[in-house]
Structures are given as structure tokens and as C-alpha cells.
Amino acid sequence: MSRLLVILLLAGLLLAPAASAQQPGGDPFAPLAPPVPAPPPEPAPLQQPATDEDEGLSSKVIWLTLGVGMVVLLVIGLLIRRDLRNTVRAGRRGRGRRSGAPTGAPSRTGKPPAPARPAGARPRPKDAHRAKVKAARKQRRRTRSR
């Protein structure tokens, strides 16, 4: 198999120069055809007088674009501010809940909600600690605002 491949490769190499000799003149050693003369140069285009249309955007359009951009930025800022206020207000309303789901509804993790404590039951140590931290935070806010 390898002998056949070598023979085909050698035959291809030997026939390649014969194929290139088949040029229009027939003689590979004939002189090259004379070069094609260069086309005559084209005349330079005439300069047209400048008009008001070639100046680009007018100052009115630029000021209008800047004004619209400022209005868009102002509206975006107001929307962000309103959303922030709504978020803070919602956080104050649902003080005990973190997930925002109504009591008794399953949480995002799929675990059932913690059962509500009876009115006379003692608070858990974790809840007592949270209450102390919350009271201290309220006190700092009161003293800071004065």
C-alpha cells in the first residue's frame, strides 16, 4: 500500500512541470507579454461651495438632544428614589418576617413555617437577644437624631 502511495506521489511531482508548460504560448521559456499601458489619469473633481447643509447638526438639535437626555436621567432617578422608598416602607411594615410571605405560607426553601407561640409562652433565647439588639438600635437612633 505504501509503495503505491509513493509511486502516485512521484508521478504527480513529475507531471506538475508538464502541466505548467501548457501555457498559451506553449513555450515556458518565451518572453513575458508586454505590460498593459496605464489608464489615463482622471481629472480632479471640482470643489463645490460649502453650504449650510454640510455643517452637521445645528445648535438647536444639539440643545434639544441634551435636554431630552437630562429629562430621561431625571425620570430614571425619580423612579429609583420611589422604588427605594417603597422598599424601605415595606421593610418597616413586615418587621418580624424576612421572606415577605404571609404567615402560614410555605417559604422559598420549601420548609413549613415555624408554628406561632402561644401568648403566655416564654420567648426563646434567640428571640430575647434580637429584642435586646432592636431596643439598643432604637435608643441609638433616638440619641443620634437630637
Image (cartoon, rainbow, N blue to C red):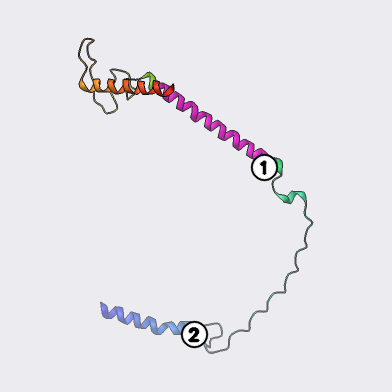
Q: 68 or 122: nearer the eye? A: 122
Q: What is the secondary structure assignment of the residue under circle 2?
A: loop
Q: 58 or 81: nearer the eye? A: 81
Q: Is residue 136 above or below residue 43?
A: above
Foreground tag (2 vs 1): 1
Q: Residue at x 78, y 58 (%)?
A: 48
Which corner quadrant of the image does residue 138 belong to? top left
Numbered circles on residues, count: 2
Q: Is residue 19 above or below residue 133?
A: below
User: Which label is found at residue 77?
Assistant: none
Task: Quickly name the residue at label 2.
Answer: 21
Does the magenta segment cover residue 103? no
Task: Quickly name the residue at label 1.
Answer: 62
Query: Mark 2 or mark 1: which comes first in sequence?
Result: 2
- Amino acid type indicated by mark 2: Ala
Q: 7 or 140: nearer the eye? A: 140
Q: Is residue 140 left or right of residue 56?
A: left
Q: Residue at x 25, y 27 (%)?
A: 110
* Residue furthest to the top: 120
- Magenta span dominant secondary structure: helix
Provide the residue span drawn in magenta: 61-90
Does the magenta segment cover residue 76? yes
Q: Residue at x 68, y 41 (%)?
A: 61
Quadrant where the C terminus sits is top left
